[in-house]
Amino acid sequence: MSLRSHIIVLNNFGSEKIDMIHTGTETPNDKKEYEVTEKDLPLHCPTPSMSLWNSHPRVFLPIQEATDGKTKCPYCGTNYVLAG
């Protein structure tokens, strides 16, 4: 399922509708912990499954370098755990 939203941009010439397509369906911070796998690497928050219109800037998280297989997003505090 994809989400479609419209943004109206006002300028001196009237308004212009701009379509933005968002493929993510999860809202950032729906959960406080996500389990990720090697196929999700390189890991970034928000993840591709999250909608972007109400999120923070993308930040890459070096979970594969963590000795305990865990990392936390510095923006939203979401915890990620590397499975397996």
Image: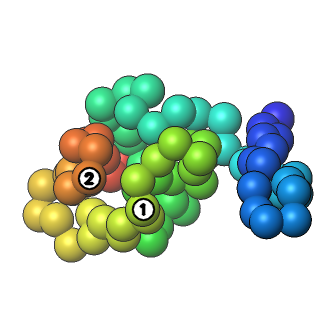
Q: Secondary structure at mark 2?
A: loop
Q: Are marks 1 and 2 in contact (CB under 8 Å)?
A: yes
Asked if 77 appears above or below 45 in the picture, the reply is: above
Q: Where is mark 1, residue-wise?
A: 57
Q: Residue at x 27, y 70 (%)?
A: 62
Choose between 47 and 55: the one closer to the eye. 55
Q: Residues within 10 Å of mark 1 (few under 14, many from 20)?
A: few
In the picture, the quarter occupied by the N terminus is top right
Q: Is residue 21 visible?
A: no
Q: Where is mark 2, residue-wise?
A: 75
Residue type (three-letter) at the residue carrying disc 2 = Tyr
Task: Give the x, y percent position of residue 2.
Answer: 81, 40
> How many numbered discs, if any?
2
Task: Give the x, y percent position of residue 44.
Answer: 42, 62
Q: Is residue 78 left or right of residue 6?
A: left
Disc 1/disc 2 C-alpha distance (Å): 8 Å
Q: Earlier in the sequence, mark 1 or mark 2?
A: 1
Q: Secondary structure at mark 1?
A: loop
Residue at the left extreme, as displayed: 67
Q: Quadrant of residue 67?
A: bottom left
Q: Residue at x 66, y 35 (%)?
A: 25
Asked if 63 appears above or below 19 in the picture, the reply is: below
Residue type (three-letter) at the residue carrying disc 1 = Pro
Q: Is residue 28 left or right of residue 26?
A: left
Q: Residue at x 52, y 42 (%)?
A: 54
Task: Give the x, y percent position of residue 49.
Answer: 60, 45
- Which disc is residue 8 wearing? none
Q: Quadrant of residue 48?
A: bottom right
Residue at the top extreme, as displayed: 30
Q: Residues within 10 Å of mark 2 (few under 14, many from 20)?
A: few
